[in-house]
Amino acid sequence: MTSTADQKSIRTSYLGLGVMGYPMAGHLAKNGYQVCVYNRSSEKATAWSEEHSGTTASTPAAAAENSDVVFA
């Protein structure tokens, strides 16, 4: 079984910050997960990262590269 501390060290990526993706990635970040986001419009990804203290990637591959879990 995985402890809560172990779960929080899981690196996640979220590809696409639309109507569902933006808040779902936010819930991960608010619950302590490390989240890297990618969105076709970099402005939306930047806004998300400023709001949720996450990171952004310039391509989907870059977002997924160091992630344990990728949501697409």
Image (cartoon, grey):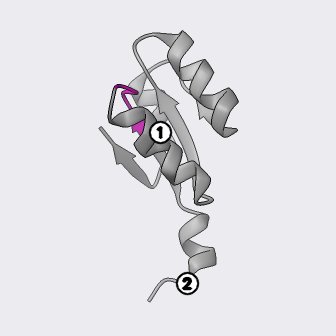
Identify which residue is drawn at 47% across, 39% down. 65
Mark 2 and mark 1 residues within 8 Å of each other at the beta carbon: no
Does residue 30 appear anywhere in the picture?
Answer: yes
The Cα–Cα distance between marks 2 and 1, rounded to whole angstroms, is 24 Å
Tell me where residue 3 sits by quadrant.
bottom right
Residue 42 place in picture, x, y as percent? 52, 12
Indicate the quadrant containing the N terminus: top left, top right, bottom left or bottom right.
bottom left
Span shown in magenta: 14-18
Identify which residue is drawn at 50% across, 51% down. 27
| Label 2 Cα crowd, 10 Å radius (few <14 / some 14-19 / many 20+) | few
Provide the secondary structure element on which disc 1 rests. helix
**Magenta stretch: residue 59 in it?**
no
Residue 54 has which mark? none
Task: From the image, tell me which residue sits under label 1.
Answer: 65
Q: From the viewer's perspective, is residue 6 above or below residue 24? A: below
Name the main secondary structure of what is drawn in magenta: loop
Tell me where residue 21 sits by quadrant.
top left
- Three-letter code, disc 2: Ser
Q: From the viewer's perspective, is residue 38 above or below residue 44? A: below
Is 66 placed left or right of 71 in the picture? right
Task: From the image, tell me which residue sits under label 2.
Answer: 3
Does residue 64 appear anywhere in the picture?
Answer: no
Residue 26 place in picture, x, y as percent? 52, 43
Q: From the viewer's perspective, is residue 70 above or below residue 41? A: below
Identify which residue is drawn at 63% across, 30% down. 49
Residue 54 place in picture, x, y as percent? 64, 38
| Label 1 Cα crowd, 10 Å radius (few <14 / some 14-19 / many 20+) | few
Closer to the chain start, of discs 2 and 1, is 2
Indicate the quadrant containing the C terminus: top left, top right, bottom left or bottom right.
top left
